[in-house]
Image (cartoon, rainbow, N blue to C red):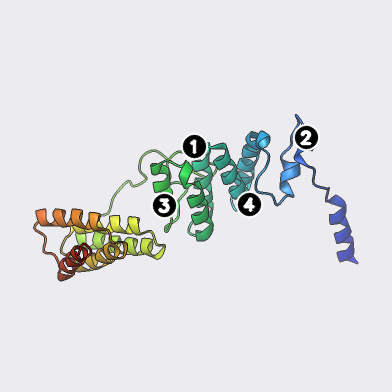
Amino acid sequence: MAAENNTKLVRATTHPEPLPDQFPGAFEPVYPVSGSTELLFPSEYHELLADFFCHCIARDPNDLRSHVRRILLEHEREDRGQLFAALLDLFIALGKRGIRLRGRMLEFAKDKLDPSQYGLLSESFAKGLDSFRVPVVFGSMLGRGIEGNLNLARPVTDKREATRDALVEAREYLEYSQLDEARTVLERAILREPRRAELYLDLLAIYRSTRDRGNFSRMSRELERMEAPLPEAWRELAEYFRSLND
């Protein structure tokens, strides 16, 4: 009986969803949006809806539907700054979770972002974003970015430890098929300490799988200039690239 009464109570308080054109000049986003499964809305309401979605996200950072709606809306408005803020909030809210959703949204918005914005989100894809360790971005509801550095003291680490960290970081990128990021990490680590053989193996595997002769040649010149001892696998890959011209 209690369940039946509760069902009736819920039904009694559920109002039919109004259509947007029922609110000319006095649009209240909460009415047509809250109960709707739509992701896109008429352009004349975008400004009001953008503000509404920001409030939804500030109130409940895990409201993924509002995150997605906001990203789609800002992409359609072609507001690069607000689109970046919307993506930033999604990445902060999910942390390391929601890999597929974050990946889809980032690739969807890539054409509207500048390289630095896309790079920041792409580089943080595997590790997630800390709300305190992001730049100050106007429009972000969840970012607590600060100017400067939170590190009052920096621990001293030897080169070997730094290289181990670089190898782990590169393999995290490879796990998510982020080959360019992994390649960059490995190249920098090898130039710091060119005698670590395991770094070469991972980097050569990337060069070979992508047939990246350009970056291979550039690194070859750098290492030759440093008089670094190249492993046999490096020479084998050089022969492989030469054979492609035959």
Q: What residue type is labelled 2?
A: Phe
> Residue at image x 29%, y 63%?
206
Q: Quadrant of the N terminus?
A: bottom right
Disc 4 element: helix
Residue that numbered label 4 is attached to: 65
**Which label's residue is closer to the chain start, 2 or 3?**
2
Residue 140 at x, y percent in the picture: 52, 41
Tell me the number on the disc at residue 171.
none
Q: Which amino acid does label 1 sit on?
A: Gly
**Which label's residue is closer to the chain start, 1 or 2?**
2
Disc 2 element: loop
**238 or 18, nearer to the observer:** 238
Distance (Cα) linking label 3 and label 4: 22 Å
Residue that numbered label 1 is attached to: 81
Distance (Cα) linking label 4 and label 1: 20 Å
Q: Is residue 38 visible?
A: yes
Q: On the picture, is 182 further left or further right than 8?
A: left
Residue that numbered label 3 is attached to: 122
Distance (Cα) linking label 4 and label 2: 23 Å
Q: Dot 2: few (<14), some (14–19), or many (≥20) neighbours within 10 Å?
A: few
**246 or 223, nearer to the observer:** 246
Outermost front residue: 246
